[in-house]
Image: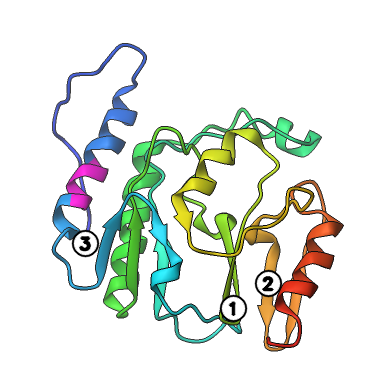
Amino acid sequence: MNLHITAKLPVKPGLRKRDAKAILATRLLLDTLKDHPKVKIVEVADVSKRQVNCTSEKGKLSSAIVSLPTYLDWAEPINVAELANMGNKPNRATAVIEHIQFLLTLLSHGVELTLVKPSADTLEGVYTRDIAAVIGHKCILANMVAEPRWPEEKTITGGIIPPSEVKLEGGNVIIDGDVVFIGVGDRTNIEAVVWLQEVVGTAF
């Protein structure tokens, strides 16, 4: 399925045409999928209302929380490598259309989707893997370092909230059977490792 956005939209001051196309594509998708039996469109994903389970990065995916790169922009850099890449701004229209193809592929394989509506406050909200980590039957919420990403933490509720000294992004957590790999660096600290060991324990 190829999507070609050709409608002409009035462009507000400061809004590029390709950004207007990204917003239009998002609206079309939300309208198309609102009655899909395997799609739930929400403002906030409440994981307390679902049975979560993840013991591997491999195998059949049954459900996922997703969003769209409608307002995608790079947050403030927190290291030299990120600063060097700041000039490579994404084309939002292209990103949205490609991501729609990705979501349609997931649906074609029977994956149930909880689609969090994109917001101008969540510039990197498309990276839903970062806002939480599911380890076994427990959903661990993130505590992000980068201030521009803090609003993303409000798009998911019902999980285990880390203490303030723990800095954690779900994208730094990888599960392989009974082993959990945690990347420690700018966005996930060693306190997160110690805390996760206490929270997960031997239950996983």
Tell whether label 1 touches label 2 (CB within 8 Å): yes
Pick whichever, 42 or 34, lies toward us. 42
Which residue is labeled 1 in the image?
A: 57
Q: Which residues are magenta?
A: 25-30
Q: Main secondary structure of the magenta part?
A: helix
Q: Secondary structure at mark 1?
A: loop
Task: Give the numbered dot on residue 1.
Answer: 3
Query: Of the residues shown, which amino acid type is indicated by label 3?
Result: Met
Tell whether label 3 touches label 2 (CB within 8 Å): no
Query: Of the residues shown, which amino acid type is indicated by label 1?
Result: Glu
N-terminal of the pair, mark 2 or mark 3, is 3
Tell whether label 3 touches label 1 (CB within 8 Å): no
Q: Position of residue 77 (x, y in %)?
A: 70, 33
Taking the image as shown, residue 128 lies to the left or right of residue 4, namely right
Q: Secondary structure at mark 2?
A: strand
Which residue is labeled 2 in the image?
A: 174
* Alpha carbon distance from label 2 to label 1: 7 Å
